[in-house]
Image (cartoon, rainbow, N blue to C red):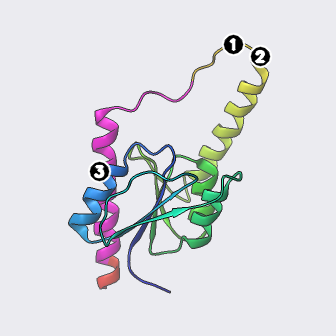
Amino acid sequence: MDNQIHIYVDADACPVKDETYKVAYRTEVRVTIVSNSHFRIPVHPLIDRVVVSDSFDAADDYIAENANESSIVITSDILLAERCLQMGAYVLASNGKEFTKNSIGSAVATRAIMADLRAGMSNENIGGPKAFTKADRSQYLSALDRIITKMKRNAAC
């Protein structure tokens, strides 16, 4: 197994790609951007792109199949987070919330309840996720730094 820290970004709707690149440059951590479509990424030896098919969950499948104890996965997809945690990866949402083995069960349950509510509300709006803020961006940067520092410290032991 490769012990180098590797960040996988579920990139199609990720609002913190630029922040991830900056942290990667500073900490010398590899990043793979995984998406269903091509878009511009920085030309840098630490940044890589994988474009998967547009089939349902193709990006999720790629990330979950490659995630391991040396991985940090950036996603807001709760089911992908659960799969990656099972592989031993750290998982971070774009708002800085870290998914853990202790918290993922309630997140999956909440997701299921919300899906049921949305299905039962024909034309009524029950709201979506809150708007992404500067505070979310700051929390993300802080959490990503903390996780990388922890992983590097653990690797040194």
Q: Earlier in the sequence, mark 1 or mark 3?
A: 1
Q: Residue at x 53, y 74 (%)?
A: 68
Q: Residue at x 55, y 51 (%)?
A: 37
Query: Is 47 located above or below residue 140 in the figure?
Result: below
Q: Which residue is mark 3?
A: 141
Q: Earlier in the sequence, mark 2 or mark 3?
A: 2
Q: Which residue appears farthest toward the left when viewing the image? A: 26
Q: Amino acid at mark 2?
A: Ser
Q: Kindly indicate whether the residue at mark 2 contacts the one at mark 1 (C-beta within 8 angstroms).
A: yes
Secondary structure of residue under mark 3: helix
Observer-nearest residue: 110 or 77? Answer: 77
Q: Which residue is mark 1?
A: 124
Observer-nearest residue: 42 or 75? Answer: 42
On whether residue 54 falls in the magenta region, the answer is: no
Query: Is 56 located above or below residue 149 in the figure?
Result: above
Q: Kindly indicate whether the residue at mark 3 contacts the one at mark 2 (C-beta within 8 angstroms).
A: no
Q: Amino acid at mark 1?
A: Glu
Secondary structure of residue under mark 1: loop
Q: Main secondary structure of the magenta part?
A: helix
Q: Amino acid at mark 3?
A: Leu
On whether residue 134 falls in the magenta region, the answer is: yes
Say whether residue 58 is left or right of residue 20: right
Q: Which residue is mark 2?
A: 122
Q: Residue at x 28, y 34 (%)?
A: 134
Q: Count the marks: how many? A: 3
Secondary structure of residue under mark 2: loop
Q: Quadrant of residue 124?
A: top right
Q: Residues within 10 Å of mark 2 (few under 14, many from 20)?
A: few
Magenta region, residue range: 128-153
